[in-house]
Structures are given as C-alpha cells and as structure tokens.
Image (cartoon, rainbow, N blue to C red):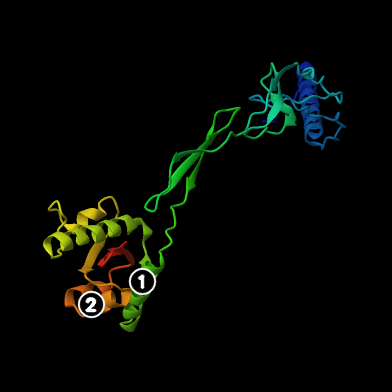
Amino acid sequence: MKYKFNIKKYKYQAIFLSCLIFLLAGIIAVSAFRGNITSAPQEELPLAETTTIPTQPTNTTSTSNSTEPEDEPESEPEHIHAWTIKTIQPTCEEDGYILNTCSCGETEKTNPTKATGHSYGEWEIKKEPSLASEGVKERQCISCQKIDKMVIEKLVYQPNEIQSEMLRLVNEERANHNLPALKYYGAAQEAADIRAHETRVQYETEHDIHHTRPNGDSWSTVLDGIELLGAGENICAGLTTVEQVEISFMNSTAHRENILNPRFTHLAVGEDGVCWAQLFLAL
C-alpha cells in the first residue's frame, strides 16, 4: 500500500517549522559572531601617567593620577636667640669671660680675660731645717688666701779638719778590703759629741770607759729620733791624734769589725780632749 503525502494538509505546519529552523540558525549565527568579538585581541589604549607623591609614612602607599605636587608643610620660623649676659670675673687661677645664656638653653662664652695670677706675700718659716730634717716655709696669696708651701732642704754639715781626717782614714781601711766608702752624717754630730763628752766624764771619774751612759742607759739611746737600720760605736781615751786613734781601733777586734762592717753607710766623729767617739750608722 503506497503512502501519499498530502502537502496541502500540512502546509501550515511546514511553514512554522521552517520559521523555527530559520530562527535557530540566526541565534546560532549571532552567538558565533559574539564569540569572535570576545576572543579577538583588544587594542591597548593609552593610560594617563601616574605619579606617586611622597607623604608621611603610613600603613598604605597612595598614588595619584595628577602630576601636581602636594603642598609642603609650613616650616617653623627660625629661632632667634635672646641672650642673658653675665660677666664672670677672672680669678687668680681661672680666666674670666662673658657668659651668654638663651632661653632655649644654649650658652656661649665671649670676651675671655686671662687669670690674674697669685699675689703672694712674704715667705714665713714654719719649721726650721736641721741636720736631721727638712724645714718648711709658707706664703699666702693676698687675693684668694691660697697657701703656697716650700720645703727647705736639710742643713748640710761641714765636718771640721779632725772629723774629715778621721773619715779619710776609715775609708782607706775600708778600701783596702773592697768595701764602699762611708759618708759623713752631720745629723748625728750632736750625738757623737755627747758620747765623746760622756766618755771623758767616765775616764776622769772612774778611770775607765764603757758603752753605758752615765744615767745607766745604753749608748744607742743617744741616737733616739734618728731613723736607722743599725748602728755601732767605737770609743777610746788617752790618745791625742787621729792617727793614734785609728791605729788603736784597727788593733782591736771589736772596733775593727765596726770599721769594716759592710752594712754601715755613714760616720760621725766626736772628740773631747783625749777622748774620742766614732758612731757608725746604717741608713
């Protein structure tokens, strides 16, 4: 059985279907055209120049499209010093000047003036020098009352002829034994003279001499007040010349030991008539 399509019967349906197909084709074409536009490379457009203006530090960085700089903060007016002037007068030891002080705390010194220096009065001796110790003299500044002190050297004793000859003979004996020469010690001269006199008193009253003083003390007490490391004494009586005394001492073992003692550094000699005293000292 043959089927025969009746076009007249489906005329309107065919027209509708054709329009629908045409509409769908148009939509597809439009969609494809839009896709081409979207994927096409876009031309870069020029941008305005961007300038970053430095500002006070913040947590973010700001930019601006404007090329005009921001207004700078107003600067503080320059400080003008208002000086208070004080004159500092010079003293004996320090220079004078003008002290300028500003309310801001700044200071400056101008117009320096040299110190005047001390104006001392006359020297006054406060302690007389002796053979054993130095002396002291003072003077006072009239302006500032400062005390200036000066040491006066010890007195230098000049041994007489007998004392010098005794020292020479002692040092000859020491040189013969390769010992250093002794120096004359004037600070012990008074003690040597006392011991020579005390020996004479003993010799005349007791017809004997010994190393005990008339009051019963040891001979060494005559040296009290003199700083010593050690001391020795030789005494004799009945001899008239230095040579006789030295020979007598060198012939006595105990006296000879004092003369040749390497510890001793100084000598003082006392003489009273026919009585003699040698004081050896280690200083």
Residue found 37% across the figure and 69% down from its top: 162
Looking at the picture, how far across and down is residue 62, in whole percent?
Answer: 73, 25
Disc 1 element: helix
Tell me if residue 10 can be seen.
Answer: no
Which amino acid, mark 2? Answer: Ser
Depth check: 98 or 170 in front?
A: 170
Looking at the picture, how far across and down is residue 123, in whole percent?
Answer: 54, 38
Residue named by callout 2: 248
Marks 2 and 1 in Cβ contact (< 8 Å) = no
Depth check: 248 or 45 in front?
A: 248
Quadrant assignment, res 34: top right
Residue found 21% across the figure and 61% down from its top: 200
In terms of sequence position, does the residue under pointer 2 or pointer 1 come before the other? Answer: 1
Quadrant placement of the N terminus: top right
Disc 2 element: helix
Cα separation, mark 2 vs mark 1, equals: 15 Å
**In-image side of 196 versus 100 (left or right):** left
Q: Is 245 drawn above or below residue 151 in the view shown?
A: below
Q: Residues within 10 Å of mark 1 (few under 14, many from 20)?
A: many
Q: Which mark is residue 167?
A: 1
Which amino acid, mark 1? Answer: Leu
